[in-house]
Amino acid sequence: MRKDLSRAGEEARLAQNNLRRLADILDGLPEALHAELATLWGTLGEIARRSMEREISWLEQVSVITSMFDERLKKLDRGGAPKMHAFEVLAKGLADAYQSAKGRRGITWNEHGQKYGGEFVELVRAVLPLATKLAEKISLGRPLRVPTQGVHALGKYLSTHTDARKKKQTRARM
């Protein structure tokens, strides 16, 4: 739908520009030629010529409105996998609570086992089943989206998002 709106807006702009150029050319013709054309066009042709300004205005409105909707739709959906906003809020809230309680990050990378771990990762894994059930009830059956791509997806997501949050807070204090 967004592509159709974009095309409609572009075509309206082109038609508006073409009609504007045509109107300017016709207005620039000598008066004697205007009279001759009016005779050839007849009454309907003359009415159409006089209504060109309304058509140009209408095309301008079409262009503006379709562009506005196109811009709004761009912000709503850019394609790809849906964002995990609910999980992000849950993870950041749990990270803040964990940080307050323990005073440390709680995520580790085990080089030997090639996996993320730590108390915070375990806390999130323990909370996820309950959070998933609640999310489905609250959102009328829509599941809670969680990082699932790959074996380390949850730990990597938590490490990246909670570590970035910690760095921002540290910079803000300086």
Image (cartoon, rainbow, N blue to C red):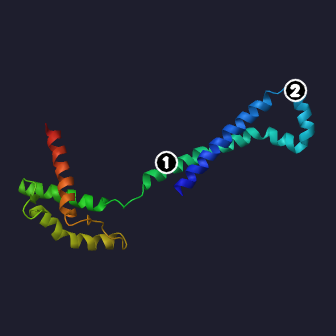
Which residue occupies the foreground of this view, 96 or 8? 8
- Residue 60 seen anywhere in this rendered image of the structure: no
Q: Which residue is mark 1?
A: 71
**Label placed on residue 126:** none
SS state under label 2: helix
Which residue occupies the foreground of this view, 124 or 98? 124
Please name the residue shown 21% across and 56% down the image: 92
Please name the residue shown 73% across and 38% down the image: 53
Q: Which residue is mark 2?
A: 31
Residue 148 pos. (x, y %): 26, 66
Q: Quadrant of residue 56?
A: top right
SS state under label 1: helix
- Residue 158 seen anywhere in this rendered image of the structure: yes
Q: Earlier in the sequence, mark 2 or mark 1?
A: 2
Q: Give the side of residue 115 with respect to residue 42, left or right.
A: left
Which residue occupies the foreground of this view, 173 or 118? 118
Residue 43 pos. (x, y %): 90, 42
